[in-house]
Amino acid sequence: MNIKRILTWGTFAVIIGLIVWGLIAASQKANRETASLPLTDEITASDWVVGNASSTSVLVEYSDFQCPACALYFPLVERLINESSTTMRFAYRHFPLTQHANAMPASQASEAAGLQGKFWEMYTMLFETHDEWENSTDVKTIFAGYATKLGLDMDKYTSDFASEAVIEKINNDMKSGIRAGVDSTPTFFLNGKKLANPQGYDEFKKIIDENINPQIES
């Protein structure tokens, strides 16, 4: 009886030890993954960025290509980039919402194009043709057509579109957004500070100018 009891408690201790070890390992893995995610006040090597490379002012947008509001903000962001290209950097990060069935494929298309040096060209095309593919049931064909127009190597594009590396890149953008409190699109951060979505270009530009140049009076 004592031997059975010892064996029972010994087995129980081993199981508890394995559970504790598993929890510690999972926690360490989660911490490593979180540490590798981009912050909202920094630019990383994985980001798609335009603007002045030496500027310390960073505007980050978490966006969904299918999102109607993101499409409406697209021309505002484009104008802002053009008029502030010497004073700030702009980074686009993916945040495809689950209710938008075509958002994830659109992000994949942009990333696949980016691996051939054409991210921003695909980014522009996706937003400018938003109404064309927003509710399509065959977006892969449509996006492949865009890739052809951009002169991409289609074998490479097709392979990259479905690659684990592209999916991981998009998911990491989403995880960094979730960590920062993103729950809708578009969401903007200026130097790490979450902005209330501006109502029009003038308000947007004023927010940027006041944060980049604090000495400017309202």
Image (spheres, helix red, strand yellow):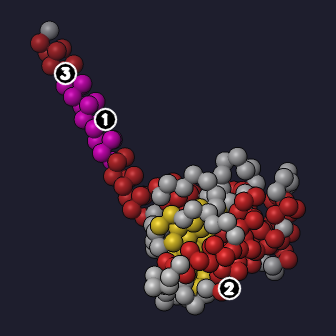
Residue 142: image tag? none
Q: Amino acid under label 2?
A: Asn
Q: Which residue is mark 3?
A: 9
Give the vertical position of 73 relative to 175 (above or below).
Answer: below
Q: Which residue is mark 1?
A: 19
Q: Earlier in the sequence, mark 3 or mark 1?
A: 3
**What is the CA distance from the residue labelled 3 to the residue labelled 1?**
15 Å
Q: Earlier in the sequence, mark 2 or mark 3?
A: 3
Q: Is residue 34 magenta?
A: no
Q: Which residue lies most toward the top here?
A: 1
Q: Amino acid under label 3?
A: Trp
Q: Which residue lies most toward the left here?
A: 2
Give the image quarter of residue 69. bottom right
Q: Amino acid under label 1?
A: Ile
Q: Which residues are magenta?
A: 10-25
x 14%, y 9%: residue: 1
